Image: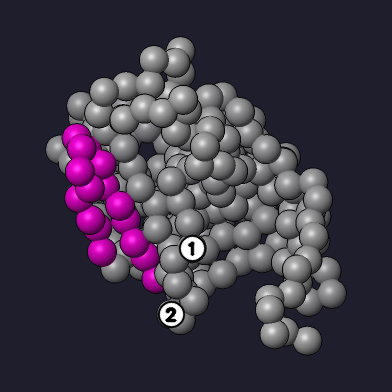
Amino acid sequence: MFYEPATGHGLPHDPLNAIVAPRPIGWISTRGRLGDNLAPYSFFNAVAYTPPQVMFATTSGKADRPRGKDTAAQAEESGVFCVNIVGWAARAAMNATSAALPAGADEFEAAGVARAPCTTIDCPRVADAPAALECRVTEIVALKGRGNLMVLGEVTGVHLRDDCLAEGRFDVLRAGLIGRLGYRDYVRVAEVFEMPRPGEG
């Protein structure tokens, strides 16, 4: 089949998120004048090595926020955010923090997630996340569509859980990383294979 997004696909559910998959989940924590916030975003990725930079994007708006959702609003207000990487053990808590709560509600508390302080920024992080990236906002880009915002940040600090390191590498299998698919589907990283680039020894 072929369809143009502007005219619709005719399927019971939008296939786009299932096509662009698996997507890493950025479990973004922020701190603002209303308190701490924690929410998952699958429109998330690393975008540069030097300096290390990441992005996440929020979609649609929120009635109690003048622009975007709580995460983007607080990142814009404070100038910082933390990306917590989601492991298998935290899947239910991560999902719980996707609930639409009023601005100022504390998802750490609501979902029973332990928090720890960041080192280079004034922001909480998920205490037992396999990895966490402390970030300073570099740019917020308004995307086409109502309430769509892309937040870019430079990574200023990296936390790695010791049991997720093996032979000098961050081990995604030990970390039990999960990713987002389409619909209500997720994936757990269960197999890793290596392919040298052309010309590499």
| Residue 51: mark | 2
Name the quadrant containing residue 168.
bottom right
Q: Helix or strand or loop: what does disc 1 sit on?
A: strand
Does residue 29 show up?
no
Amino acid at pointer 1: Ala
For image coordinates 31% across by 37% down, the residue present is 59
| Residue 46: mark | 1
Q: Please rate how many residues cluster around mark 1, counting C-alpha atoms within 10 Å: few if below 14, some from 14 to 19, many from 20.
A: some
Instruction: Inspect the magenta stretch and tell me whether residue 188 lies in it.
Output: no
For image coordinates 51% across by 72% down, the residue present is 157
Range covered by the magenta-colored residues: 139-154
Picture coordinates of residue 76 (x, y %)? Answer: 25, 55
Magenta stretch: dominant secondary structure:
strand
In the drawing, does residue 122 fall left or right of residue 89?
A: left
Picture coordinates of residue 154 (x, y %)? Answer: 39, 71
For image coordinates 25% across by 28% down, the residue present is 6
Name the quadrant containing residue 96.
top right
Of the image marks 2 and 1, the number of the one nearer the N terminus: 1
Vertical relation: 164 (above or below) 6: below
Picture coordinates of residue 85 (x, y %)? Answer: 59, 52
Q: Quadrant of the C terminus?
A: bottom right
Vertical relation: 200 (above or below) 147: below
Picture coordinates of residue 122 (x, y %)? Answer: 39, 63
Spatial CA distance of label 2 from label 1 is 11 Å
Vertical relation: 185 (above or below) 148: above
